[in-house]
Image (cartoon, rainbow, N blue to C red):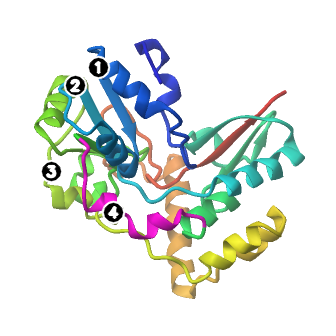
Amino acid sequence: MIRVEGDISPLRGSKYFQAKVGDAFKQVKKDLEEGRKVLFSGTGCQINGLSLFLGKEYSNLFLLDIICHGTPSPKLWREYVSYQEKKHGKLESVNFRCKDDSWIDFGMKENQLYISKDTDFFMRMFLRDYCLRPACYECQAKRYRKADMTIADFWGIQAVAPEMNDGRGTSLVITRTEKGQELFEGIKSELKWKEVSYEEGVKGNPSEYKSVARPQQRDTFFEDLDKLSFDEMAKKYAADRKVPFKRRVVNKIKRTIKKILRGGGLKNTKMPTMASSSHSRSNSDYGMLLTFKK
C-alpha cells in the first residue's frame, strides 16, 4: 500500500511472481469509506476479486490492470532464488526487465548478475508456460473485465506506429471506462502518445483476449518440483530447444544486424525512434538483473 507520491518507486517494473494480496481488499474498502482516492493495480483476476468484494461502485476508486500472460509458481521462484544465492550470496533485488546497453556483453559485474530472458532458467520455464496457476490456462478475467484502464507492452509497435518505437519498449494503454479515459486525459500532456485502434493495439499481444495453452507436461512439472533440485528441473524443463536450420539462419542475421547498429555501422540507415532516444535494440531484448549483497 502506497500512501504518498514519493513512495511509488516500489510499484515500478515487472514482477514475475504471484502477489500476496493479504488484507489489501479490506484496507482499500476502509480508505474508500473514509473518502480517500484509491488507485488499485493488479492482474485482471485481482481487479475482479476486489470489485466483487466491495459489492458496489465507488467514484473515488480507480482500477488498473495489465495484459497478463499468467502468474508463475511462488515455489519455483523460491527454488530459483535459493539456486542463485548458493552461488552468489544473499539476493538483494531483481530487475526482471533490464534493458541497459552496458549489460549486453556481460554476465557478472561486481555483485550483479545479468541473464538474458532467452537463457535464464526461471524465465524459460515461465515463458514455456509450465509453472502457471491452473486458472491461468482458462482465465475468466479475459472475458469479464472490471478495470478502468489496462497497461501492457505494445508488441508489434514497429508495424503499427514505427515512429513511436525507440527499441526499449513502448507501452500500450487501453481505456475501458469513462473513468479510465478521464485518467488518461489528465496525464496525456506529459506523454508522447498516439491513438491507434483496439485491434491494432492488441494484435501482437494475444494474452489480452485468450489464455495460454496448458502444456502436456504441466502436471509432471509440479510433481518434479516437489522432488527434484532446481538444477535437475532446469535440465529437464529449461534446456535448449532444437531450432530448425532456417530459423537459426534468420536469428543469426538479426543478431549480426543488431551488432552492426550498436557499433555505429550502417550510418545512413534511418531507424524509427522516439525523439528522446536513439536506442536500436528490440523491445524483446531484455533480461534478469540480479543484485546481491556485497
Q: Residues within 10 Å of mark 2 (few under 14, many from 20)?
A: few
Check disc 3 and give the amino acid type.
Val
**Which label sits on residue 187?**
2
Alpha-carbon distance for marks 2 and 4? 30 Å
Depicted 252 relative to depicted 82: above or below: below
Q: Of 260 and 131, which appears nearest the observer? A: 131
Query: Furthest-left residue in view?
Result: 178
> Looking at the image, do the residues carrying marks 3 and 1 touch, with CB atoms under 8 Å apart?
no
Give the CA separation, mark 1 to mark 4.
29 Å
Q: Which residue is mark 4?
A: 140
Q: Residues within 10 Å of mark 3 (few under 14, many from 20)?
A: few
Mark nearest the camera among 2 and 3 is 2
The CA span between labels 3 and 1 is 37 Å
- Distance, label 3 to label 4, CA atoms, is 26 Å
Residue indicated by mark 3:
196
Q: Give the mark nearest the N terminus, 3 or 1.
A: 1
| Cβ atoms under marks 2 and 3 closer than 8 Å | no
* Nearest to N terminus: mark 2 or mark 4: 4
Other-residue count near label 1 (Cα within 10 Å), few / some / many at <14 / 14–19 / ≥20: few
Image quadrant of residue 37?
Answer: top left
Disc 3 vs disc 1: which is toward the camera? 1
Horizontal relation, residue 10 to residue 163: left or right? right
* Image location (x, y in percent) of residue 257: 49, 61
**Magenta segment, which residues?**
131-147
What is the x, y in percent for residue 144?
A: 24, 57
Whether residue 14 is visible here, answered yes or no, is: yes
Residue 137 lies in the magenta stretch: yes
Q: Earlier in the sequence, mark 2 or mark 3?
A: 2
Which residue position is annotated with label 1?
33
